[in-house]
């Protein structure tokens, strides 16, 4: 009796394995080898250096075909003893959106259908700072700043307790050791849970294949940052990971005509961010949610 | 004006500290000032300038200020501090800082004003002078035309 049960179980196991094999072979035989390889590509954090190299070479080849430019895709890891934070002086921002378009260019955003932007400049009535729901980001006057308004640019706040990371069902988004929350666009399944979870509207979705003019491509990219994305991938601000890990200011900092935007390393006591936190009146957006953003708004004081 | 600054960087040594500032925003063909001024007599009288520099509108505490409060009368290629010390235009932040102390303090820390390039490592960095953003004769920041707003999602 015992012997019979054992063989039956064994039979079932063998039968189901055979059925699985029979199912998968037709699935993979209906697609090319390259597609099968893409499908089986590992999670970025589980790749060995050799695997990373192979993926980078493949992507560079693909981008060359698609955009006619030689790309340099970096996989540079976080620099030791760095923990990035951002500062934005509200009393200086004039709402000119120079940062928005510098970001679009630097980070290879889709320009139209869909138009994706990582920075959203909110316009609020002066004295009404906490009523974010009354803000307007489609404002379009001839000249800025307008009397009676202040401007509050919002982008990914690089939370220390990021709700977007918690909800991702496939771990396609995570926080790097230098505090930057990144996305492996190849691992993302496009479920958009993270977009729903983010209280800052910091993430955007590629509803269609992105449109980037070939002549405006930025070929100096990072795998976890500004490389061209694909349809169905979620994307967000990475503090210009490709720049800051080399010691350069993010593109929006350099584009701001009023010097509103500041960037620095929280672990460096001489950094600009430490100066701001020590000496200025700072606040963070929606602090009560416990997301611990590393994006500090401050005032002249 | 900003582009000009990116091309060259000079190190200004002001009061013991070194800042890699961008070249000062001079009107093209103006500098050195001594080309014209060396052969001219010094006229300290406050007056409307009609022949040269007529585009300069002085709106910088103009009731109590005149050119020679900041520009040196004898050496026009230099600026003059309150204590009589002559400084180059690349160190103009020291002159501005004589009145605008808190801004000067924050500028030295990289908070007021703007820095571009590399913030760490051996890469090139450029600090903007006060005069790159504020016209010293008319320092109030001018309004700008904003870039276009994002496209509104269509109602369907």
Image (cartoon, rainbow, N blue to C red):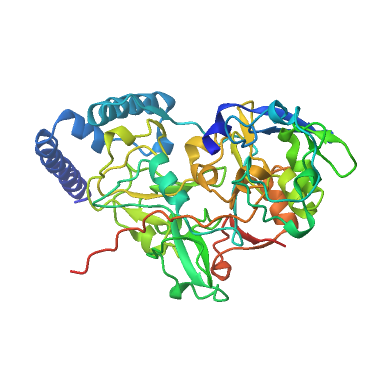
Q: Position of residue B156 (x, y in %)?
A: 18, 69
On screen, residue A200 versus residue A114, left or right, reads right
Q: Residue at x 38, y 58 (%)?
A: A194
Where, by quadrant of the figure, is residue A218 drawn? Answer: top left
Residue A226 seen: yes
Residue B82 located left or right of residue B65:
right
Camera-nearest residue between B71 and A247? B71
Which residue is found at the position 26% from the left and 31% from the top? Answer: A67
Decide if residue A269 is in sight here: no
Image height check: is A74 above or below B147? above
User: Within the image, what quadrant is residue A203 found in?
Assistant: bottom left
Q: Position of residue A85 (x, y in %)?
A: 60, 49
Q: Is residue A214 above or below residue A114?
A: above
Q: Give coordinates of residue A250: x percent, y percent.
A: 52, 42
Residue A43 % position (x, y): 37, 39
Residue beneath the point at 36% across and 40% down: A108
Location of the C terminus of chain A by quadrant is bottom right
User: Which residue is at the front of the view, A91 or A169?
Assistant: A91
Residue at left offset 40%, top offset 65%: A139
Position of residue A187 in the picture relative to residue A25 (left or right): right
* B54 and A86: which is toward the camera: B54
């Amino acid at each position: 009796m015992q012997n019979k049960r054992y063989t039956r179980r064994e039979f079932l196991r063998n039968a189901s394995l055979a059925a699985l094999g029979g199912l998968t072979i037709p699935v993979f035989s209906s697609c090319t080898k390259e597609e099968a390889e893409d499908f089986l590509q590992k999670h970025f954090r589980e790749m060995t250096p050799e695997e990373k190299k192979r993926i980078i070479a493949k992507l560079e080849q693909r981008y060359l075909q698609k955009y006619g430019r030689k790309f340099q895709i970096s996989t540079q890891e976080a620099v030791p003893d760095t923990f990035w934070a951002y500062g934005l002086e509200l009393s200086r921002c004039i709402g000119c959106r120079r940062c928005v378009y510098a970001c679009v260019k630097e980070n290879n955003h889709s320009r139209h259908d869909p138009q994706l932007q990582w920075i959203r400049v909110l316009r609020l009535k002066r004295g009404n700072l906490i009523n974010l729901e009354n803000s307007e980001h489609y404002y379009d006057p001839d000249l800025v700043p307008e009397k009676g308004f202040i401007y509050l640019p919002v982008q990914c706040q690089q939370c220390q307790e990021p709700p977007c990371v918690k909800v991702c069902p496939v771990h396609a988004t995570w926080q790097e050791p230098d505090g930057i929350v990144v996305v492996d666009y190849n691992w993302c399944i496009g479920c958009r849970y993270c977009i729903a979870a983010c209280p800052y509207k910091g993430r955007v979705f590629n509803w269609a294949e992105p449109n980037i003019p070939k002549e405006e491509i930025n070929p100096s990219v990072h795998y976890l940052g500004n490389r061209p994305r694909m349809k169905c991938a979620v994307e967000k601000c990475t503090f210009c990971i490709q720049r800051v890990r080399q010691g350069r200011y993010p593109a929006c900092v350099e584009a701001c005509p009023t010097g509103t935007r500041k960037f620095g390393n929280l672990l460096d006591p001489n950094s600009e961010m430490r100066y701001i936190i020590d000496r200025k009146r700072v606040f963070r957006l929606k602090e009560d949610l416990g997301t611990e953003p590393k994006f500090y708004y401050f005032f002249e004081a | 004006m900003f582009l000009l600054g990116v091309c060259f960087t000079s190190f200004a040594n002001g009061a013991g500290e070194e800042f890699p500032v961008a070249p000062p925003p001079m009107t093209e063909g103006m500098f050195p000032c001594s080309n014209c001024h060396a052969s001219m007599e010094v006229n300290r009288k406050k007056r409307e300038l009609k022949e040269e520099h007529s585009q300069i509108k002085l709106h910088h505490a103009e009731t109590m200020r005149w050119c020679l409060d900041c520009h040196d009368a004898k050496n026009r290629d230099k600026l003059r501090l309150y204590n009589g010390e002559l400084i180059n235009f690349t160190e103009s932040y020291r002159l501005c800082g004589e009145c605008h102390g808190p801004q000067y303090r924050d500028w030295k820390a990289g908070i007021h004003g703007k820095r571009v390039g590399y913030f760490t490592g051996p890469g090139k960095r450029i600090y903007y002078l006060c005069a790159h953003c504020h016209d010293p004769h008319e320092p109030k920041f001018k309004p700008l035309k904003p870039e276009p707003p994002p496209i509104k999602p269509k109602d369907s």
